[in-house]
Amino acid sequence: MIFLTGGAGFIGSNLLAALSDRGSDVAIADFMGQDDKWRNVAKHAVAAFVDVDGTLDWLDARAPLIESVVHLGAISSTTERDVDKIVALNVRYTLSLWDWCTNNGKPFIYASSAATYGDGSQGFDDDGDTAALARLRPLNPYAWSKHVVDRRIARLQAVTAPTPPQWVGLKFFNVFGPNEYHKGDMRSIACKVFEAIAENRTVSLFRSARSDYADGEQCRDFVYVKDCVDVLLWLLATPSVSGLFNVGTGKARSFLDLASAVFQAVGRQPDIDFVDMPKDLAGRYQYFTEAAMTRLVAAGYTAPMTPLEGAVEDYVTSYLSQPDPYR
């Protein structure tokens, strides 16, 4: 059995779908809430729904059955300001799972984030060395909490402390795709643009506040969630690989490119205007991200990432435009 936190969330439910299709038993821990998040898991067999607060007791009682722990659950909102809540769930809970996997000899894969790179001035190299990580300056509490975990694990590595038999941290870049609908304002631009087009609303992107970036030309490494799942499946099947790795395409594209790809997928000419960035976001905004993918490739992962236009086409035609858009 695989224990999956965040199993009803965005990346987690896509991994659940892939594992379920393969016949794997998957137990999930997540906060389901009172909205339609349950639909993310409705099509798939779930071995157990585990109370988040009771995770360690549940794992202790079933330790011989657990093959791997995949920890994708987190408070992922970049605008969340309750830092105590973020520390409890993103830091302490993560490190408690690390300790459990170490003590029980189980593989541990967890989600970090490209947000840990901050404004990008230190580059986007997934160097897990303690000194390299110390140079990064995350821009919000969510990113900082992910960075805290990365640094703690790097420190344990540096002093040769005990670790799980396989451990992997994944710095996901800008992921988009099916089952992100519950994320509200944290949904991808691809999802928001499609929704605006479908409702005959104006499609708006942020104006640039920097002279070196034109409006809409702010860049991200947009990666399709199916590619992220393929990386996770490969890691689960390759226990010899451990480390901290970026997960992106390795090629930055603009928000204008992404929005235009959605228009193309629905057979419409782009019609986009620009709005000012909210003041509370302006000082914490990444203008450019691009994953360095050499370390993951060197570890043996050589499958190509889906190009932006192809990923958007699949997302729009296979999910967003369907009566049932869930994977």
Image: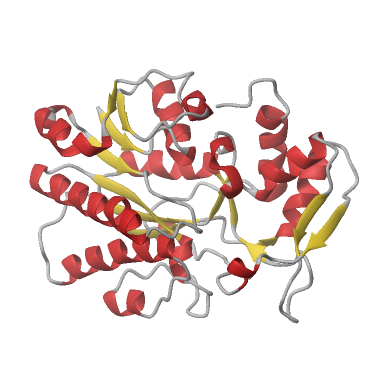
Decide if residue 199 is on the left or right side of residue 187: right
Give the residue drawn at x 46%, y 70%: 117
Image spot of residue 212 (x, y percent): 73, 80
Image spot of residue 78 (x, y percent): 50, 58
Give the residue drawn at x 39%, y 52%: 300
Which one is nearer the viewer's eye here, 313 or 188?
A: 188
Where residue 104 sits, quadrant-wise, is top left
| For residue 213, above or below residue 65 | below
Image spot of residue 177 (x, y percent): 59, 40
Decide if residue 272 is on the left or right side of residue 85: right
Which one is nearer the viewer's eye here, 182 or 319?
A: 182
Q: Is residue 152 visible?
A: yes
| For residue 70, above or below residue 133 | above
Q: Is residue 242 visible?
A: no
Image spot of residue 7 (x, y percent): 39, 34
Q: Quadrant of the C terminus?
A: top right
Q: How is the image coloured?
A: secondary structure
Please give the count of numbered marks on the rendered protein.
0
Give the residue drawn at x 32%, y 35%: 4
Decide if residue 149 is on the left or right side of residue 139: left
Give the residue drawn at x 8%, y 47%: 103
